[in-house]
Image (cartoon, grey):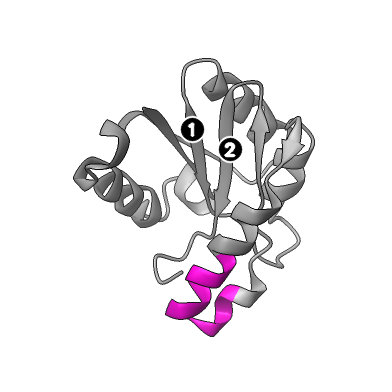
Amino acid sequence: MRIAVLTVSDSVANGTRIDTSGATLRSLIEASKILCAKTVECCIVADEKQHISDMITELCTRSDVVITTGGTGFAIRDVTPEATLAIIDRRCGGLETALHMRSLQSTPFAALSRLCAGIKGQTLVVNLPGSTKA
């Protein structure tokens, strides 16, 4: 299974912060023995709706799964769910619920995440919070 990781963050994109959430995701994927998953690509994009949509669309052409991290909160520039909803064909509501439930076991702040998940063509797209605690 080919998995792409997309970090969505203004501060990571402009070099003022280190990409800890993307690095954590990569480590978890590489350590996983499930489905022979491997990270095929890691990218960073600023919190711009069109740039996020374009990058997800591009990554879907060469990945089985695209996982985004960041941009799911309440800040005005947190637009990852909107960018994702603009390009997916169908939502995966059960997966969204399961991810929220799992995150809530780690932190009550997970309730503030607006993550979404869906299918674009043959590719699963999942938004995760940028916090490594969630």
What span is in magenta? 100-110
In the image, what residue occupies the spot 56% across and 23% down? 60
Which residue occupies 57% across, 80% down? 109
- 101 inside magenta stretch: yes
Looking at the image, which is closer to me, 89 or 134?
89
The residue tagged 1 is 65
- Asked whether, in this view, residue 132 is left or right of residue 130, the answer is left
Q: Position of residue 7 (x, y in %)?
A: 48, 44
Q: Amino acid at mark 1?
A: Val
Q: Earlier in the sequence, mark 1 or mark 2?
A: 1
Mark seen at residue 125 = 2
Q: Quadrant of residue 61?
A: top right
Total count of labels:
2
Q: Report the side of 90 relative to 40 (left or right).
A: right
Q: Which mark is residue 55?
A: none
Give whichever of 97, 83 is nearer the camera.
97
94 w.r.t. 47: above or below? below
Q: The residue under label 2 is which amino acid type?
A: Val
Helix, strand or loop at disc 2? strand
